[in-house]
Image: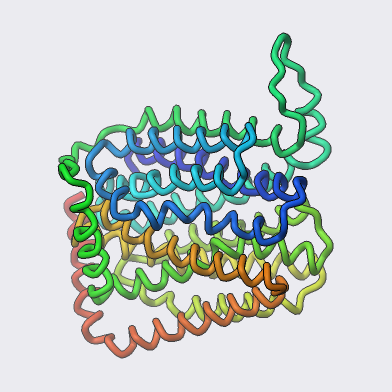
Amino acid sequence: MKRGFYTIMSAQFFSSLADNALFVAAVQLLRSGGAPEWQQAALVPMFALFYVVLAPFVGAFADALPKGQVMLYSNTIKIVGCVMMLFGTHPLMAYAIVGLGAAAYSPAKYGILTELLPASQLVKANGWIEGLTIASIILGVLLGGQLVGPMVSGYLLSFDLPLLDTGIATAPEAAISVLILVYIVAAWFNTRIPKTGVPMRPLPNRLVSLLPDFWTCNMRLWRDRLGQISLGTTTLFWGVSGNLRFIVLAWASAALGYSVTQASALVGVVAIGTAVGAVAASLRMRLDQATLVLPLGIGMGVLVILLNFITNVWVAAPFLVLLGGLGGFLVVPMNALLQHRGHNLMGAGRSIAVQNFNEQACILGLGAFYSLSTGMGLSAFGAITVFGVVVAGFMWLIKRWHERNCREHAADIANLLEIARHDNLHG
């Protein structure tokens, strides 16, 4: 890999680390303030809100400037959201601002891969960056759980700055103040990302003109024979995975009687499996083999449903590792295939924005459904059953659709294989 790839990975690691730790801190902030359960569940869709609203614009923005610069601006927005949460803004609103930064960040961090690396290295690059992202989820959730726990928070709150009253008096506030520093580290790495030399695509004079352009890009991916398979799979995977992060917290509280700090460790366990699966996929899978992983999605749905029957943490831990592993092995080749098709059809930034729009719209829709259902009395066990059925059912439909169009897909896959061979021969 080129040297710039490792700088991108470092920037992504620290930014994602802070995102996930902040989620746990925000949950604890709401719980300590006596907020109802539905508000805690609403953190997930609020984070996804700007991914959906700004999707027509962030991809074009990522293509109009050097992507390292876009990532720096985005991290600055995340810091603003943290400061707002720290000084009294409602956690749902402040977390939405952090989501705004993440929405602008994502097209740049993935789009730069297609500018920096040849197609033959995309699966490997995605495996490593997804594996590192999952590692940051593991450590971020664990970090957030420890920062709001009594031992670390007590140590942090014991600090007194001379001649300065910060007003930080609770464990979640102390955690957020530490996470601002983590975002600053990520921003420093953003300044070290090299320019790729790819020509910029200037923003139009009238931004509203991006709406029909975005809609055209969206339809182009959905109508592409391989694009629709990969987009449908990643949309469903991230839609469920995004909400499963909170559902595991709720399930651990209901089934095991765990606190936020204890339950955050189980969310990390799922992420460990996902990291292993992502790295394994990067080592074993090629771009032309991407559609072979579709049956794993059905298995994921079945495992989610079986989670309802587990009441022992020693059974739950390896079970959650397996669940995460299937997801990691599924999503890496699908992500690489989607990036490759999108880059060829419309450009890296726009294709990632389309992908984010669909995935985050799924997170937003499922999260709003879960939050509403929780307000109406749906238990964590009921939510897990619904999510499992959705995953297994839709993955079965996607698999059947692929098999029905297998002859047409075979020609596209053969073309991908030829491209990969060409890249290997000519560097």
Given the current orientation, which residue lies at the most extreme bottom position?
404
253 versus 382 height, above or below: above
Q: Whole-percent x and y of residue 9?
A: 44, 42
The residue at 34%/54% (across/down) is: 55
Given the current orientation, which residue lies at the most extreme top position?
163
Q: Whole-percent x and y of residue 341?
A: 25, 64
157 versus 419 height, above or below: above
The residue at 38%/34% (across/down) is: 73
Q: Locate the N terminus and report the quarter of the image it occupies.
A: top left
- Of residue 164 and residue 325, the one placed in the foreground of this image is 164
Q: Does residue 421 appear in this view?
A: no
Q: In which quarter of the image is residue 156?
A: top right
Residue 310 is left or right of residue 112, and the answer is right
163 versus 289 height, above or below: above
Residue 60 is left or right of residue 247, and the answer is left
Q: In which quarter of the image is residue 167?
A: top right
The residue at 63%/77% (across/down) is: 303
Q: In which quarter of the image is residue 91?
A: top right
Residue 208 is left or right of residue 311, and the answer is left
- Of residue 167 and residue 351, the one placed in the foreground of this image is 167
Q: Does residue 187 appear in this view?
A: yes
Q: Give the mark count.
A: 0
Q: Whole-percent x and y of residue 187?
A: 45, 31
Q: Whole-percent x and y of residue 133?
A: 50, 49
179 versus 379 height, above or below: above
The residue at 49%/68% (across/down) is: 365
- Of residue 162 and residue 92, the one placed in the foreground of this image is 92
The colour scheme of the drawn protein is: rainbow
